Amino acid sequence: MSDDYILEFDNVTKTFPGVKALSDVSFKVRRGEIHGLCGENGAGKSTLMKILSGVYPFGTYEGRVIYDGKELKLESSAIHQAAEEGIAIVYQELTLVPAMTVGENIFLGREPTVRGAITWDNLYSTTQTILDRYRLDVHPQDVVKDLGVGKMQMTEIAKALSEDARVLILDEPTSALSEAEIDKLMEILRTLKANGVTCIYITHKMNEFFRITDTVTVMRDGKIVTTQPTKDLTPEKLVSYMVGREMKERFPKGNRKPGEVIFEVKDLHADWDDREVLKGVSLTLRKGEILGIAGLMGSGRTELVMTIFGEFAKITQGTLTLNGREIKIKNSHSAMEHGISLVPEDRKRHGLVLMQTILKNVSLPNLDRFSGFLRIDQNAEIVESLRIAKELAIKAPSLHVAAETLSGGNQQKVVIAKWLLSGPRVLIMDDPTRGVDVGAKFEIYKLMNELAEQGIAIIMISSELEEVLGMSDRVMVMCQGRTNGIMNVADATQEKIMQLATGIA
């Protein structure tokens, strides 16, 4: 291998019972570059990175991984050995201990000691050196649970770099970050590159590849499709490599014809934990309409929809009106009785019981429909769940497989399925395509169009402005717990939305 390359995957093949996850994967990563790795869920990206980081040790796969000129053989204590070799991974799901400080998290399990006692001054001064070297804007003695998601992400990166990582793998690092936090992460990655660290960057956000990577490798069905300099690609070409077909439009145009106003929020104020989180929110929602809600993290978007659904803040002022009548929502059961359903932001924590089957997840909030005298009508439960699963094209061997075994896109479809089974008139979708690959995103967009065409009114929160502009009929922008503007999508631009979101306009 040339000195220009730090990594080479040579015909790597990985098989699970009945499934070939990787098939003869071969490509190279240049020393000191930011190398993008993309593909739909199930393409093999995570499996390949688990081989590189030692989750799947040497001998559990075929082929070779060449690292810095030598074959990488991570064996018994493979993950620890990978760290010693300078290979670190930052997962999408953060692995920090919330009650500990930044410094304690960074050196957890390998604290500096003298005669068996931790030397706290040494621990915190070394932490500060690492933070300064990579310009990470956190303090060694900050308690992690008091940090925002962006600073938690920085702490996770510092933890990975504390063992002098030469290869840093970032798996969906911006999925929960605001625009400002993404900008900061991009600065950090440029600093890492300047310090000679090689980064492998995995994301479902197309624009980030063009913003930060030098080279992109595309995977599909466990195989390599292409490796090209990013400058030679376009978003359309990249998507076509990923899905194996040309996609002329990312946001399908439905045949929506919004009708009369069916839901209204008027001057809503709400408190949570002795703090006012909603300070005057007003909106109208029409039958068959998609109303996009944009705003920076902390603007109150999720707090608003969770409160409407009866599961967050206490309403202190304002009204909710459905079909011209004022309604009071005490909890999620009450919301469902009024025909309001919520697809939550974090499907794994709030949307699914991961160990349970698809069938149980879909039927769980709808048991009233299937219950008789002291028993559940299991035939009706299966028939209805199967019907909605087919309508949403959930890809699974049967309804009896656990939700945790599904891809991100299919997990999201299960969450949508269970709420559609409740027959909502108002469907709230909080970041519905977060962590979902481009092919599954397109399917969810088509589904949203179909639901709106059937007359369901949809509120969609999204952190991606392109998605807001591509899917909405109107856009509402929130800033500091307030409505700061509502406009028709024809009049909206990313610049106008950001001006409203930051409070400039």
Image: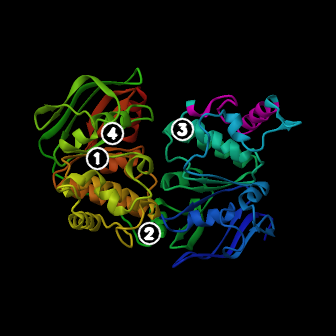
Identify residue for label 4.
293
In 3D space, how far apart are the residues under numbered discs 1 and 2 (Cα atoms)?
24 Å
Residue 123 belongs to the span the image colors magenta: yes
CA gap, disc 1 and disc 3: 27 Å
- Which disc number belongs to residue 243? 2
The residues bearing labels 3 and 4 have C-alpha atoms spaced at a distance of 20 Å
The quadrant of the picture occupied by the C terminus is top left
- For label 2, count other residues whose C-alpha is less than 10 Å away and answer few (under 14), some (14-19) or many (20+): many
Mark 3, mark 4: which one is toward the viewer?
3
Q: Secondary structure at mark 4?
A: strand
Question: What's the amino acid at mark 1?
Answer: Ser
Mark 1 Cα-neighbour bin, 10 Å: few <14, some 14–19, many ≥20: many
Q: Is residue 194 magenta?
A: no
Q: Earlier in the sequence, mark 2 or mark 3?
A: 3
Q: Mark 3 is on which residue type?
A: Val
Highlighted range, magenta: 122-145
Q: Which residue is mark 3?
A: 149
Chain-order first, disc 1 or disc 3: 3
Q: What's the mark number on residue 472?
A: 1
Q: Position of residue 117 (x, y in %)?
A: 83, 34
Q: Taking 459 as reference, is 397 left or right?
A: right
Q: Position of residue 305 (x, y in %)?
A: 32, 37
